[in-house]
Image: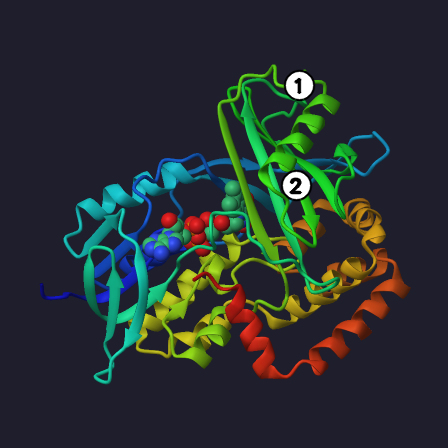
């Protein structure tokens, strides 16, 4: 059978891939795209939230269902506090609606071929410069390949050495009644009264409309936390909030693990050394090291990559410019400090929550802090341990040879 020819092969048709194809079409690029994805369905419950400035141009993202302008938090003393978001908002995308809208548009576009239930094994660059992609449904012959395959769905095995990073493990349930009464414009960013089962454990609550509430329990730890332990922690949290254990009707569930590390780097560093296809999305280092937030970065990555691909620019350096390297370095210090001194994690997050205004925290989370916000962040964090963390991080970066860093990056990439 002849390989199927296309201009662009996209491996993994998840969140990033969808944003990328939408951006490409938005720029008027009408090449032939084949997207393969091992999953058959795109209607599982999932959501992505990100911080948006009110003066930003329209996001052009389908599936936005909520936008909040205030958050609440607790720092361990039982007292709820709140912060207003005056120039920012916290935006919620419903993954089901996001995919449904994109797939409906693609059905009407003869140049886009989405192939669900097809697993991609890998891609090899041929001497003629084109790519051969092997998939469970035959070979693709592509002028360009972008690899957006996600990390493994199973519990990851790797543990981080103290300071090298954390795993963010989380489990959430959508319940038909509010665990904490949240009005239309308020969400709960961090409830540090949720328990102390890991270096850091906290609750996160989103009111999704009609009384439905997502209640999530998140842990930051050196190793990933298995689903059973996560669910026990979530049960415990629900009880603390006043829900009887297991009595609540569950409308949806979600869980996941995200590596938080400043060592995983952006995609180009991982792909440049092995001459593999360009990696992007979460598996390409889109998650912010200190928070695990990825959606904002993926939107930026998708825009710069689409511009590079349509403009004939080398995509790898363009991708690397999609976010600031200094933010990753700052996050590296944060992770190194708290990884080596886990007892400081809760008080440090509490200081950030209490010491920053809503807009300051939002701009910091969105990777767009001004000098005043940055100064405020540095001011509220405990000085001595963070200076020691900065020193340790500097020594660590200079101890490891670049080749070793690259290897570590590749080991963390999905197979
Ligand atoms: C439950 C959950 C909630 C999250 N919430 C947020 C949030 O609120 N805000 C935020 O910023 N980030 C969030 N994230 C992190 C991140 O934004 C998401 O994981 C996002 O889906 C990553 O997009 P992606 O395109 O990189 O990966 P995915 O959306 O996971 O897409 C990758 C695709 O690759 C496919 N695939 C994998 N292997 C193969 C293969 N061999 N062949 C073919 N296809 C393959 C998968 O089926 C999948 O469809 C969350 C993550 C999870 C798991």
Helix, strand, or loop for circle 2?
strand
Reading the image, the residue beneath label 2 is 218
The N terminus lies in quadrant: bottom left
Residue pictured at 72% horizontal, 18% vertical: 242
CB under 8 Å between callouts 2 and 1?
A: no
- The percent coordinates of residue 25 (x first, y second) are 27, 58
Left or right: 371 in relation to 134: right
Tell me the CA gap for discs 2 and 1.
18 Å
Residue 32 in view in this figure = no
Disc assigned to residue 282? none
Classed neighbour count for the residue bearing mark 1: other residues with Cα under 10 Å, few (<14), some (14–19), many (≥20): some
Helix, strand, or loop for circle 1?
loop
In terms of image quadrants, where is residue 403?
bottom right
In terms of image quadrants, where is residue 393?
bottom right
- The percent coordinates of residue 221 (x first, y second) are 70, 50
- The percent coordinates of residue 305 (x first, y second) are 39, 67
Left or right: 69 in relation to 34: right
Q: Nearer the viewer, residue 13 or 61?
A: 13
Q: Nearer the viewer, residue 217 or 110?
A: 217
Q: Nearer the viewer, residue 367 or 132?
A: 132
Classed neighbour count for the residue bearing mark 2: other residues with Cα under 10 Å, few (<14), some (14–19), many (≥20): many
The C terminus lies in quadrant: bottom left
Look at discs 2 and 1 and give the one toward the viewer.
Answer: 1
In the image, residue 13 above or below residue 191: below
Disc assigned to residue 245? 1
In the image, residue 265 above or below residue 362: below
In the image, residue 196 above or below residue 264: above
Residue pictured at 52% horizontal, 54% vertical: 296
Residue pictured at 75% horizontal, 24% vertical: 240
Left or right: 231 in relation to 414: right
- The percent coordinates of residue 195 (x first, y second) are 77, 35
């Amino acid at each position: 059978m002849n390989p199927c020819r296309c201009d662009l092969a996209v491996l993994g048709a998840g969140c990033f891939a969808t944003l990328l194809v939408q951006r490409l079409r938005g720029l008027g690029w009408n090449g032939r795209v084949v997207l393969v994805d091992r999953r058959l369905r795109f209607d599982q419950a999932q959501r992505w939230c990100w911080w948006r400035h009110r003066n930003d141009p329209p996001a052009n993202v389908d599936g936005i269902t909520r936008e909040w302008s205030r958050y609440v938090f607790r720092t361990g003393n039982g007292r709820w506090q709140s912060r207003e978001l005056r120039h920012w908002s916290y935006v919620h995308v419903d993954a089901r609606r996001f995919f449904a809208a994109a797939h409906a548009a693609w059905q009407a576009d003869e140049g886009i071929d989405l192939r669900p239930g097809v697993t991609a094994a890998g891609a090899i660059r041929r001497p003629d410069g084109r790519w051969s992609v092997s998939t469970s449904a035959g070979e693709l012959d592509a002028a360009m390949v972008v690899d957006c395959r996600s990390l493994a769905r199973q519990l990851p095995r790797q543990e981080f050495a103290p300071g090298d990073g954390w795993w963010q493990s989380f489990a959430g349930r959508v319940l038909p009644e509010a665990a904490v009464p949240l009005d239309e414009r308020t969400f709960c960013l961090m409830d540090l009264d949720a328990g102390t089962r890991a270096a850091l454990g906290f609750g996160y609550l989103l009111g999704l409309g009609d009384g439905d509430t997502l209640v999530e329990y998140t842990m930051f730890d050196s190793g990933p936390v298995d689903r059973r332990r996560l669910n026990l922690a979530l049960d415990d949290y629900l009880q603390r909030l006043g829900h009887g254990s297991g009595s609540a009707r569950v409308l949806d569930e979600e869980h996941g693990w995200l590596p938080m590390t400043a060592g995983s780097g952006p995609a180009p560093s991982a792909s440049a050394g092995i001459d593999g296809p360009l990696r992007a999305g979460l598996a390409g280092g889109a998650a912010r090291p200190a928070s695990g937030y990825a959606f904002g970065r993926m939107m930026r990555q998708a825009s710069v990559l689409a511009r590079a691909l349509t403009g004939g620019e080398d995509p790898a350096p363009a991708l690397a410019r999609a976010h600031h390297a200094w933010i990753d370095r700052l996050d590296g210090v944060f992770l190194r400090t708290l990884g080596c001194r886990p007892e400081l994690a809760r008080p440090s997050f509490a200081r950030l929550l209490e010491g920053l205004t809503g807009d300051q925290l939002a701009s910091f989370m969105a990777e767009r802090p001004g000098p005043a916000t940055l100064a405020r962040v540095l001011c509220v964090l405990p000085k001595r341990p963070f200076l020691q963390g900065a020193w340790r991080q500097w020594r660590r970066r200079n101890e490891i040879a670049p080749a070793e860093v690259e290897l570590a990056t590749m080991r963390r990439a999905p197979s």
